[in-house]
Image (spheres, rainbow, N blue to C red):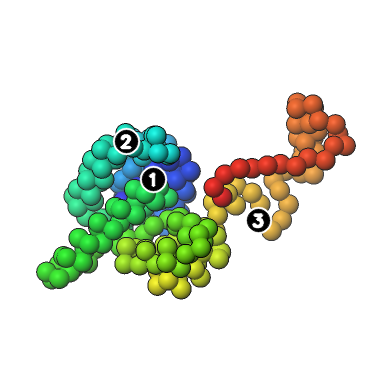
Amino acid sequence: VVFLVAGEASGDVIGGRLMRALRNEYGGAIHFEGVGGDSMRAEGLASSLFPMSELSVAGFAEVLPSLPRIAARLVQTQRAVRRAQPHVVVGIDSKGFNLRLLRSLAHRRAAAGRNGIPAAPVLVQYVGPSAWAFGDADARAARLRGRVDELLVLLPFEEALFRRAGVPATFVGHPALDDVAIGGEPPGTAAERAAEAAAFRREVGLSPCAQVLCLLPGSR
């Protein structure tokens, strides 16, 4: 049993691809539970514990009134994990929620271990916090020590940062690269790409000779 928690559309896509890879590896011997959206349901999540959209909040004005509901969902998820008794719990991005969930599960596991109960489940966070963006990067990275058994990171330099802080980390690549050809030509023939580019320029009123600068704002 693998219990996964995604709280936003990008995490749902990552979760769906992870589930597909696990099914390809283990076939019908794997069962999924947790929180997710359309992509994860398409890959075998029978039903989401609650609507994923309830975790998709950002900004002080949006988060503050949602805190009681999010706290209740955290407790609900903790109870669901205990009922499911999964082998692995995977938090996918949504770090405000998932790192609190994993910390609580780590504390509970430690207490169970002291009482002679076998340690389970394995705790994994897929997409790490952007500790590298701050001056106290090492200190921020170290906050994950003891919370997770494995951190799956998207950027190559993150692996060394978290490992230096004592956090087991593995660079797995950015999911955006799953949508493009790696180390070769982009999808389609050269003629098809040229025709698509020309059609785009006509659609937005750009000269065929104009240079184009593409700005892609986002967290990554």
Q: Label 1 sits on what residue type?
A: Ala
The residues tagged by marks 3 and 1 sit, at their Cα atoms, a distance apart of 26 Å
For residue 6, which numbered disc appears in the image? 1
Instruction: Determine which residue is flagged by label 3.
Output: 182
For residue 66, which numbered disc appears in the image? 2
The residues tagged by marks 2 and 3 sit, at their Cα atoms, a distance apart of 41 Å
Say which quarter of the image contains residue 34.
top left
List x then y, in percent, for residue 200: 75, 31
Q: Is residue 191 visible?
A: no
Q: Residue at x 37, y 64 (%)?
A: 143
Q: Label 3 sits on what residue type?
A: Ile
Q: Earlier in the sequence, mark 2 or mark 1?
A: 1
Q: Residue at x 45, y 57 (%)?
A: 128
Q: Label 2 sits on what residue type?
A: Ser
Say which quarter of the image contains residue 89.
bottom left
Describe the element under mark 3 as helix, strand or loop: loop
Seen from the viewer's position, the closer of residues 48 and 187 is 48
Q: Residue at x 30, y 53 (%)?
A: 100
For residue 207, which numbered disc appears in the image? none
